[in-house]
Image (cartoon, rainbow, N blue to C red):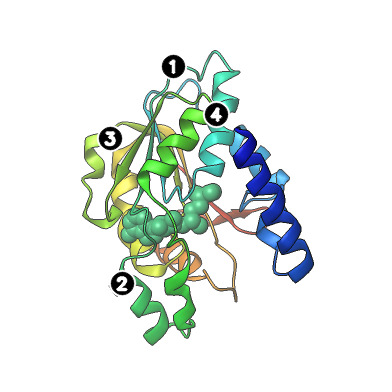
Amino acid sequence: MSRLTRAVRVIIKDISLRIGRNRQLFSLYPYMFSPAQLIFLTDCIKSVSDVPGNFVEVGCAYGATTVFLNKFMNDNKDLAGRNYYAIDTFRSFVAEHADYEIQNRGKPPSIKKRFKENKKAWFDRSMAVHGVKRVKSIECDATQFDLSSLAPIAFCLIDLDLYIPVKDLLPKVFSAMSPGGIIIVDDCQPDQMWDGALQAYQEFTRQRGIPAEIVLEKLGVVRLP
Ligand SMILES: C[S@@+](CC[C@H](N)C(=O)[O-])C[C@H]1O[C@@H](n2cnc3c(N)ncnc32)[C@H](O)[C@@H]1O
């Protein structure tokens, strides 16, 4: 970091400390998962080390979990050789998907502002900064992406927050999975902002006759036989 950058950072931090509204600037925890949930995710990827296929994260945002899981993979020789695909619009939700939440699921219009300040180039730079080389980022609306092009998939984290994309993706991901693979759907928790994911997960498991398994409050699990 140059002296100028360091000086600017110091000034910005000091000013924001005085004026308040500085939560994000001082946060040292970029994850949207608790430590127990992150450990569960590492257990999941370890458990598929004998299952052939790619690892996929649909909805990777700024890449915090991507970096965490990939650093874990770097340290595990059984996992180090896997491909990891990270899919996102890198510009928030698809407008019609967010409108559906607002008009039909009672969510506030402010959901449209979430995850807006992002760019694929920023995500890629974050991977490079952390020495994560295997991640291939894909910028698209995941509901328009041909998931079968990533088959076979051994592990997939679906982290899209809203009802429509999770509802759309679950069957597509399911058919691209290897036997023995694991799908995790985040936000399977009732009565919260992103409970569309729970509704889609419950409908999917019910329709397929798969037992619903929600662990650590919000992680919906689908285990392929
Ligand atoms: C909760 S964030 C993902 C967090 C990330 N997995 C992590 O753990 O840090 C949800 C992401 O889903 C993305 N997203 C939502 N709908 C999408 C869609 N239809 N296609 C691609 N990305 C989408 C948003 O842009 C946002 O970045």
Q: In which quarter of the image is residue 166?
A: bottom left
Report whether the residue tagged 2 is closer than 8 Å to ligand 1.
no
Give the mark, 1 or 4, whose residue is nearer the N terminus: 1
Which residue is under mark 3?
150
Check the image and name the residue furthest to the top.
77
* Residue projecting furthest to the front: 4
Residue receiving disc 4 = 130
- Residue beneath disc 2: 95
Is 75 on the left-hand or right-hand side of 175?
A: right
Marks 1/3: CA–CA distance: 16 Å
Q: Position of residue 11 (x, y in %)?
A: 70, 53
Whether residue 93 is visible, yes or no, is yes
Mark 2 or mark 3, whichever is nearer to me = 2
**Quadrant of the snapshot with the N terminus:** top right
Q: In which quarter of the image is the C terminus?
A: top left
* Alpha carbon distance from label 2 to label 3: 26 Å
Mark 1 and mark 4 in contact? Answer it, CB < 8 Å.
no
Three-letter residue code for mark 1: Gly
Position of 71 relative to 176 (above/below): above
Residue labelled 3 has its Cβ within 8 Å of some atom of ligand 1: no
Crowd tier of the residue under label 4, counting other residues whose Cα lies within 10 Å: few below 14, some 14–19, many 20 or above:
few
Name the residue type under label 3. Answer: Leu
**Label drawn at residue 81:** 1
Check contact, mark 1 vs mark 3: CB within 8 A: no
Between discs 4 and 3, the one toward the N terminus: 4
**Residue type highlighted by circle 4:** His
